[in-house]
Amino acid sequence: MKSDKVEEEINRELALEIASDTIQRNDFHLKMANNRVKKAIKNLKKQQIKHTSTEY
């Protein structure tokens, strides 16, 4: 009976650790993706400026 409670607590703590690691990993990947999107937007703006300046 007592060992079941201990095992439940250990499992709960392990689950929390795994969830925390997963959140940190996802956060990292989201930041990387966000940086790629920002770079892409910057490049598109540069291209747009080049195209509009050569039209005149």
Image (cartoon, rainbow, N blue to C red):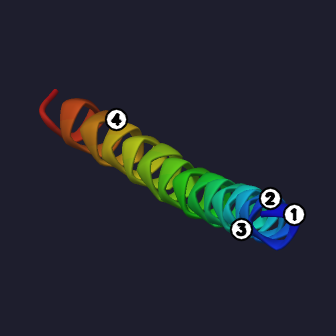
Point out the frontmost of discs 1 and 4.
1
Q: Is residue 24 left or right of residue 34?
A: right
Q: Secondary structure at mark 3?
A: helix
Q: Is the residue under label 2 in contact with that under label 1 (CB below 8 Å)?
A: yes
Point out the frontmost of discs 2 and 3.
2
Which of the two discs, 3 and 4, labels the residue nearer the N terminus?
3
Q: Residue at x 77, y 63 (%)?
A: 1
Which of the two discs, 3 and 1, labels the residue nearer the N terminus?
1
Q: Name the image quarter holding the C terminus.
A: top left
Which of the two discs, 4 and 2, labels the residue nearer the N terminus?
2
Q: Amino acid at mark 1?
A: Lys
User: Could you give the CA–CA distance between mark 1 and mark 2, rounded to whole angstroms?
Assistant: 5 Å
Point out the frontmost of discs 3 and 1.
1
* Circle on res. 49: 4
* Circle on res. 11: 3
Which residue is nearer to you in this view: 15 or 41? 15
Q: Is the residue under label 3 in contact with that under label 2 (CB below 8 Å)?
A: no
Point out the frontmost of discs 4 and 2.
2
Q: Which residue is mark 1?
A: 2
User: Could you give the CA–CA distance between mark 2 and mark 3, rounded to whole angstroms?
Assistant: 10 Å
Which residue is nearer to you in this view: 24 or 30? 24
Residue 18, x across and y down, in percent: 68, 68
State whether residue 46 is above or below residue 26.
above
Q: Amino acid at mark 2?
A: Lys
Q: Secondary structure at mark 2?
A: helix
Q: Amino acid at mark 4?
A: Ile
Q: Which residue is mark 2?
A: 5
Q: Is the residue under label 4 in contact with that under label 3 (CB below 8 Å)?
A: no
Which of the two discs, 1 and 4, labels the residue nearer the N terminus?
1
Q: Residue at x 67, y 63 (%)?
A: 15
Which residue is nearer to you in this view: 49 or 17? 17
